[in-house]
Image (cartoon, helix red, strand yellow):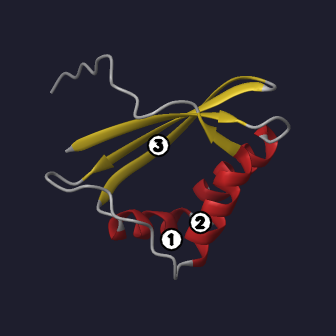
Amino acid sequence: MTVKYTLWRIKEGKRQVWEDWCREIMGKHQEEGVLSLTEEDLVRERCMVFGEGNDSYVLYEHQSLEGKKKKPFNSNRELNLKHNRIFHECLVRVNGETTLGYDLRVE
């Protein structure tokens, strides 16, 4: 499994918009969101919001299928178009690809 992390800054005044969208994804769009992940060869997409007020950030995690890279989103799916629009309305990339410091797991 390939894991990729990216760090984003939430634009000034957009934290509530982003958090509302996250709740909407996890609510009424969850089933379609999971279907979209399978179309992109992802097994997980996680968004963690941290910071306060205008000093807020998002850490994105993508886990793709073993030996696969994330495919582009399906632009025929309305949910993906809305997600892309809100994503760019609210977030600015902080840096290039973020490297993982460590990930310990007991199996």
Q: Position of residue 71 (x, y in %)?
A: 33, 64
Q: Position of residue 7 (x, y in %)?
A: 52, 32
Local crowd size for mark 2, using a 10 Å CA cut-off: few (<14), some (14–19), many (≥20)? some
Q: Which residue is mark 1?
A: 32
48 sits to left or right of 35: right
59 sits to left or right of 38: right
Nearer the observer, 10 or 21: 10
Q: What type is the residue that disc 2 sits on?
A: His
Q: CA distance from mark 2 to mark 3?
A: 15 Å
- Element class at badge 2: loop
Q: Position of residue 2 (x, y in %)?
A: 23, 43
Residue contact at pointers 1 and 2, CB within 8 angstroms: yes
Name the residue at the front extreme.
Answer: 96
Q: Residue at x 68, y 62 (%)?
A: 85
Query: In the rendering, which numbered label is found on residue 46?
Result: 3
Q: What type is the residue that disc 1 sits on?
A: Glu
Q: Position of residue 92 (x, y in %)?
A: 64, 40
Q: CA distance from mark 1 to mark 2?
A: 5 Å
Local crowd size for mark 1, using a 10 Å CA cut-off: few (<14), some (14–19), many (≥20)? few
Q: Which residue is mark 2?
A: 29
Q: Residue at x 59, y 54 (%)?
A: 26
Which mark sits nearer the N-terminus, 1 or 3? 1
Which mark sits nearer the N-terminus, 2 or 3? 2
Q: CA distance from mark 1 to mark 3?
A: 15 Å
- Element class at badge 3: strand
47 shown above or below 9:
below
Give the foreground label among 2 and 3: 3
Q: What type is the residue that disc 3 sits on?
A: Arg
